[in-house]
């Protein structure tokens, strides 16, 4: 399935009806490896617009498959994610000597995508700019121009609070909510309600601060049902997980 994704062939999956009757995590993983998306529909009526959405993505695809190529990196890649228009945590990259290749999937016309590359760097003496890596985009066997990426070390408070830094931090927070949602499901299934409540409170704190009312409402519903001692259905967990996966579209 991963080969389909690397060749620009999308493979999406659909969960229909009671999510307790099928393995949604398997369907999600299958879709992600196939460069597609997992869609959930409680009823057949909800399925039609989801199919149309997937078909529209197919029609709007302008680049079926592309890669980011990182060279001479001054650190170690810890995690590579797409955070817009929806979150996806990619498998570890392919490393060949000084070159690291990151498969990103497809691009649709008019749909911007945002990626976060988490790199651990060794301690640096003093302040100032340092070279981090060279990065380029490759598609259909053609390598684009390379750009040098630098990072700046500073102890000036004004530079640490720049708008771009706050914007990046908000995307990291949304990624954290998505990761926490998976931990909430795991702790619920393990019967650890205390840990579940802590995770819910952490996630709700982030979504409230970011103004993500839809995500907050779904998390609030789960927290309230737990407070009343009521069971949490797989459908509720599925809706919350998919909501945490979707983020704002860049303009």
Image (tube, rainbow, N blue to C red):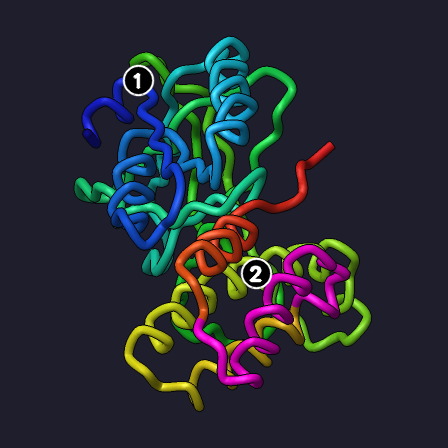
Q: Residue drawn at (64%, 71%), measured in percent from left and top?
A: 220
The mark nearer the N terminus, 1 or 2, is 1
Residue 208 in the figure: left or right of residue 104: right
Q: Residue drawn at (40%, 41%), measured in percent from left and top?
A: 17
Q: Which residue is mark 1?
A: 9
Identify whether 161 is placed above or below 136. Answer: below
Front-most of 235 and 120? 235
Q: Residue drawn at (61%, 29%), measured in percent from left and top?
A: 112
As helix, strand or loop, the secondary structure at mark 2 comes to helix
Discs 1, 2 touching: Cβ within 8 Å: no
Q: CA distance from mark 1 to mark 2?
A: 29 Å
The x, y position of residue 96, in whole percent, is 18, 40
Q: Which mark is residue 172?
A: 2
Decide: few, some or many residues near mark 2? Use Cα within 10 Å; few <14, some 14-19, many ≥20. Answer: some
The x, y position of residue 19, in whole percent, is 36, 50
| Chain part drawn in magenta | 207-231
């Amino acid at each position: 399935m991963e080969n389909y994704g690397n060749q620009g062939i999308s493979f999406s999956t659909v969960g229909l009806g009671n999510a307790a009757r099928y393995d949604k995590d398997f369907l999600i993983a299958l879709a992600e490896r196939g460069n597609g998306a997992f869609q959930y529909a409680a009823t057949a009526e909800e399925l039609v617009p989801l199919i149309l959405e997937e078909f529209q993505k197919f029609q709007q695809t302008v680049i079926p498959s592309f890669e980011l190529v990182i060279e001479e990196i001054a650190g170690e890649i810890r995690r590579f994610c797409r955070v817009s228009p929806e979150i996806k945590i990619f498998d570890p990259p392919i490393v060949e000597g000084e070159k690291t290749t990151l498969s990103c999937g497809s691009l649709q016309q008019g749909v911007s995508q945002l990626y976060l590359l988490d790199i651990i760097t060794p301690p640096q003496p003093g302040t100032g700019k340092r070279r981090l890596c060279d990065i380029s985009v490759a598609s259909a066997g053609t390598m684009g121009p390379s750009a040098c990426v630098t990072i700046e070390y500073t102890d000036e408070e004004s530079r640490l609070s720049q708008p771009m830094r706050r914007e990046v931090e908000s995307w990291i927070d949304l990624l954290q909510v998505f990761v926490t949602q998976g931990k909430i499901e795991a702790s619920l299934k393990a019967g650890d309600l205390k840990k579940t409540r802590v995770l819910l409170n952490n996630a709700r704190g982030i979504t409230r601060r970011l103004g993500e009312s839809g995500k907050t409402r779904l998390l609030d519903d789960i927290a309230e049902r737990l407070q009343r001692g009521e069971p949490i259905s797989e459908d509720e967990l599925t809706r919350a997980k998919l909501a945490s996966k979707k983020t704002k579209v860049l303009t």
